Each structure stands twice: as C-alpha cells, then as structure tokens.
Image: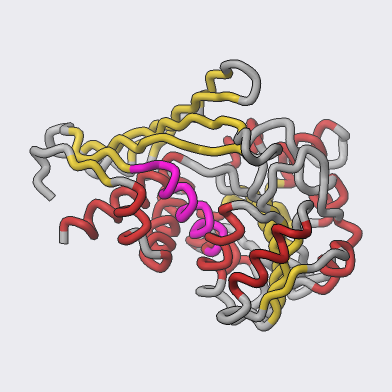
Amino acid sequence: MDKRELTIIDSKAVAAHLDYPGCMAAIRDAMIALSNGRTRQLLRTMIPMRQGRTFAQMPGALGDDAMFGAKMISVFADPDNPGTRRHRGIIAMFEPEHGMPVAIVDAEEVTHIRTAAATAVATDALARVDARRLLILGTGGQAHSHLAALRGVRPFERIAIWGRDADKASAIARRYADELPIEAIDDLPEGAARADVICTLTGAREPILRGEWLRPGCHVNIVGSSGPGPVEVDTPLVVRSRFIADSRTSALDAAAEFLVAKAAGAVSDAHIVAEIGEVLSGTAPGRQSDEDITAYKSLGHAVQDLAAAAYLIERIAH
C-alpha cells in the first residue's frame, strides 16, 4: 500500500482480510501495550443527538513510532429491530513517518470482528483450560462473531444460545447445526449453571444474568453494555467474581455493572483486580484457582480498532 495514497477499505474487504487469529494477535499486543503505557488513547467522547442517536469519537496512538488515528461512529437505534442499535462509521489511519492519512476503514465490520477477538483473547487468558461448555446470551451480530472467534481458544463440546426472542436463538442454532454442537435453550438459569464460559452480548437494560446461577470456575465475558446505564449482569455476580477490565480508567468511567455495584456499596475500586493487558503480560494474576469465577468487562477501545486496522492495512499491502 502506497503511503502517499489514501486507501478506502470497505466492509467487504474487512470481512475478507481481517481474520480472527491475526486480529486476536494484534488485540493481544495492543492490550499489553495499553496497560504498560506504550499506547495512548483518550476516553471516548459521545455527542447525544435526538433520542436513540449518538455520535462517538475514539482517538488513539499505537506508539511513538506507530500508526495513529481515530474511530468515529454513529450509534443509532435500529427501527427494524426494536431494542437493538447499529454502529456505523469509519476508522481514519495515519502513518507515523510524515503524519499522512493512509486509510479509511469501515468501522462497523472491524468492530464486529475485533470485539469478538478481544473476548476470545480474554477467554483464553481467564477461562479454565478444561472449559468445554459455552453459553451465548444474545442473538445479534456479536453472537455470530463470538461463535467464530471463541472456537479458536477452547474445544467447546456443547454450545448453548439464549435470547429474549426464542425464535431468533433457534434460527442461529439451526444455522450452525452442521458445524457446531449448538442448541437454543429456554431455561437460562439452568443453562448458566451448566456453563463454563458465558458471553453476554445483548442490549439489555436490566440484568439478564445473575451471580447466584453460576457454577464455581465459570468465566463470564460482559460485552453488551459499553457505557453507564444498561446492565447485563447483577451486582452479586460482580461481587462474586475476580473482576478484570480491559482498562481501569475506562471501567471506572463507563463499566455499568461495576458502577452499579459500587454505587450500592458492594464493591470499591479495588475490586478491579487487573487489566487484561496486565494478565496477558504476567504482571498481574487473572484466574488463581479452578474454583474462581472470573469476569471480563469489555468496553472496547480505540487501540483495539487501530491495532486491527493496522494489521488489516499491512495484510492488504502484502
């Protein structure tokens, strides 16, 4: 890719070239770098517009001599699917030698892939080695991307999917029935009690997953809520878990489930025992025993988008 030219990488190109193993490796390196201060980013800024519509900006730099840029997205309620939102936008990438813009990348497709890749990286670091039962909560696009990413970190022998719309959950199970050991379930408490790994991928406003349902040793990825307000898990789950954030700073500002538990006096800031980058680099412990319940709070970060886009640009160039 000629650094003098501005390249447009649309959603089809992202889907074709941003593979999960490569994206996971880029995310892993980015989160380690974020925790040790080699990358920089600002907290996302959000401009609310009329109800159900937000414009968000997420700038960052992958290092002093690495690519930098910003993700800019619109978050609009989807009129065709009440209760869901669409994320559309771009990632603007600049090269570090002359500060030239080199690429405009479709942000929606990158977000689909890198969010699941980040969950997979965290699951690989925090779930038990013998984890074999996966539960997906949610029936949107992230359900599909998480099914693709997570199969690369554990050999799941049973996958259950639950949704507030049972028909959508059944449709996803049928879609993957020939390639995965997957089934739709109606009894969420029973499904949660049997799961080794649980991913919450919903737009729920109130908790759908409760701490009392979890078995010892379970790992939970809390992914759906990316700001104060909507919560997917209850306070007892937060209290029971070894709570790991993708970023402490961001979690203290926007991790809804943690902030609710903190406001109730159930936890303090110290309940965030580590950032995932610290766990990955070995500077802080993640899971300490097979009986621990671990929770990873994913908020999404500019450096994840930039790392995925930089990897994508390099791959397309070669």
Drawn side of residue 173 relative to residue 259, left or right: left
- In x, y percent, where is residue 46? 54, 23
- Residue 167 as seen in the image, left or right of residue 43: right
Residue 198: horizontal and vertical position, in percent? 71, 63
Residue 133 left/right relative to 24: right
At a point 36% along the width and 44% down the height, the residue shown is 306
Which residue appears at 16% of the width and 62% of the height? 318
- In-front residue for pair 157/296: 157
- How many numbered circles does the render carry? 0
Span highlighted in magenta in the image: 106-120
Q: Position of residue 160 (x, y in %)?
A: 73, 70
Location of residue 297 with respect to 318 vertically, above or below: above
Q: Main secondary structure of the magenta part?
A: helix
Residue drawn at 16 percent across, 56 percent down: 317
Asked if one can make out residue 230 in the rendered structure from this viewpoint, the answer is: yes
Residue extending furthest toward the top = 50
Q: In this image, 230 relative to 250: left or right?
A: right
Inspect this view and state whether residue 295 appears: no
Q: How is the image coloured?
A: secondary structure
Residue 112 shown in magenta = yes
**Residue 213 is covered by the magenta coloring:** no
Residue 248, relative to residue 153: is it above or below?
A: above
Residue extending furthest toward the right: 212
Q: At x 77% / y 71%, what residue is drawn?
A: 195
**In the rendered image of this protein, does residue 268 appear above or below residue 243?**
above
Residue 181 or residue 135, whichever sits in front: 181
Q: Nearer the viewer, residue 100 or 56?
A: 56
Q: Between residues 295 and 12, which one lies in front from this camera angle? A: 12
Coordinates of residue 217 in the picture (x, y in percent): 77, 71
Q: Quadrant of residue 191?
A: bottom right
